[in-house]
Amino acid sequence: MTTVQQIINALLLGGLLALVALGFSLVWGIMNVINLAHGTFIMLGAYTAYWMFSLWGVDPFLSIPVAMLLLFVLGAILQVSVINFIVRAPVLATLLVTFGLEILITNIALKLWTADVRSVQTHYAGRGIALGSLSIPYNKLGALVLALIITALLWLFLERTKLGRAIRATAYDQVGARAVGINIGRMYALTFGIGAALAGAAGALISTTSAITPMMGSSYTIRAFAICVLGGLGSVTGALVGGLLFGFIEVFGVVWIGPGYSDAIVFLVLVLVLIMRPQGILGRAFSAGVQEAGGA
Amino acid sequence: MTALAVPAAVRRLVMPAWYGALVLACVYLALIPTIGTGYWVRTLTFIFMFAVLAAGWNLIGGFAGYAAFGQVGWFGMGAYSVAVAMSKWHWPFYPALALGTALPAAAALAVGLPVLRLRGHYFAIATLGIAITLRELVNNFDLTGAGSGLSTPLGPSFSYYYYLMFGAMLLAVAVTWMLRRSRLGYALLAIRENESAAATLGVNTTLAKAAAFAISAALAGLVGAIYAYWTAFIDPSTVFDLTFNVRMIVMVILGGTGTILGPVIGAFLLEGISQTLWSSFPAEHLIFFGIAVVLIVLFVPAGLSGLLLELRTLSPRLFVRNLLRYRV
């Protein structure tokens, strides 16, 4: 493989990973909650696409809205029934509760769908645009384009709509937000719902490019965390930059060091960045979560 | 900590009975291999193992207040040290056990110095990352049998491992007890309450945190080492099982964070329940476990020791109060 092909692969992977991290970054930035169950939402999105494809022949790209809707509802319900009670609790409580949810959801999925590795075989799988010796698979290109569109839509929503501004206001100043009549609990439910919906979209896109299992979630949660740290927390551009950077680290790390070490490479980079630059590479303080990186 | 808050008169009355009960419990546990069934020997060996893991986490998470989320990495490192030393280098068990305890402690000291500068979420995820990195290294090295695992020589008998784990648990309690009364213990509590203030008062916070991290890693490595010899076969997914991290933390919370016996009591309760669920619902027990984790953190965040402190006013309302404490 040529270097150009690897750059293409890194971009294709990075765009998708940006979407993987986007919902995680939103929830972390707005609520200061590390959602360790984020990966299971991605898994559920992937299974939504898988079942819609294998039962009714729906193309996985078309099942994205369905996956997003289902996961928005699940996310909002979880926020109202569980997460709202621990948003302000110490770090450990939120980590434990969200990990408890991750164990719960993963094992329900295992019970329902078994541990079998499944994949969505569309008619265009394995085909792509050929440019000389280079190739760009259709499904990966489609996943990249959709990931970028969804990222842009989230940015517009947060920056340009009243509801988006209300969500950001709850992250900046809770008392102030409450004073102007924003219902914090409802904003959190909305935020967590959107975070889950974004994970659902990412999952549906992942189902077009790789095999899925009920246990696939945790490695994506960890990647989402690393991407947030790399790109800087709680901003849409941070997730995008972090995702792309991450795509390059993973693709070239595997080329230079060897396959099978991708998680280790990621963590080495992550720990180094954390120690040298805890505010991330972009390093702009955005939200509630940032204060805690260095202070008590 | 709990004991200090109970009135002196009550303590004089209750404490001898409490110590008596503890001694009786130890004698009873020591007799289990001769009077109990194989099922109980196995279940209790697991419980002892988790008690040590929980006690180890308690030192860094409970005393120093650093939410380590990757202790299973040290457990796996201890397990693989024994497996490699015994199967590849043909060491006898006890030197291998020493290696399995010392290596994670040294690694934790080396890694801890930079990583313990992080706080909160960042420390938690960095430690999780260390555990995942260790698993991946083991998964790739030929020396560690890569993904297919390693066998260790067959050992004497199941009661032998039972007593090893039992001894490890007593050791972990003794270490906690001594630490609680030492300068280091007070330094850790000061760090938990206010790290900057502790540093201002002359506590060498870096050294204290790294020492606590290394001791907790040594305890995790110790039981990992015994576990490897006990099961006679290990592979990366069992000894680097990430749910172990959560298990040990929930045990500490359930028993009482920062207490001496809390982690052990939590281990008996949670692992007892887990093993019972596992034997009757092998496929679904993790679903129940996930629910239990969420419910414990929501309703009993201060654990049994917290309930003990509020014994006089104990009512269902306490649980509702716990639940609503941090509500948005």
Image (spheres, rainbow, N blue to C red):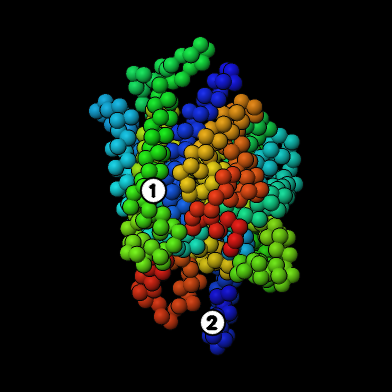
Judge left or right: residue A170 versus residue B50.
Answer: left
Judge left or right: residue B69 versus residue A17.
Answer: right
What is the total number of numbered labels drawn onto the structure image? 2
Q: Which residue is mark 2?
A: B6
Residue B298 appears in the figure: no
- Which corner quadrant of the image does residue B33 belong to? bottom right
- Which corner quadrant of the image does residue B12 belong to? bottom right
Whether label 2 touches label 1, CB < 8 Å: no
Quarter of the image with the N terminus of chain A is top right
Q: Which residue is mark 1?
A: A158
Closer-to-camera residue (B80/A131): A131
Residue A277 appears at what percent x and percent y? 63, 48
- Which corner quadrant of the image does residue B14 belong to? bottom right
* Residue at x 41%, y 51% (from the top left corner): A101
Quarter of the image with the C terminus of chain A is bottom right
Residue sitting farthest toward the left? A56
* Residue at x 40%, y 65% (from the top left corner): A176
Residue A131 appears in the figure: yes
Closer-to-camera residue (B256/A290): A290
Residue B242 appears at what percent x and percent y? 53, 46
Co-location on one chain, circles 2 and 1 = no
Closer-to-camera residue (A237/A134): A237
Amino acid carrying mark 2 in the image:
Val
Residue A127 appears at what percent x and percent y? 41, 16
* Separation of residues labelled 2 and 1 (CA atoms): 52 Å
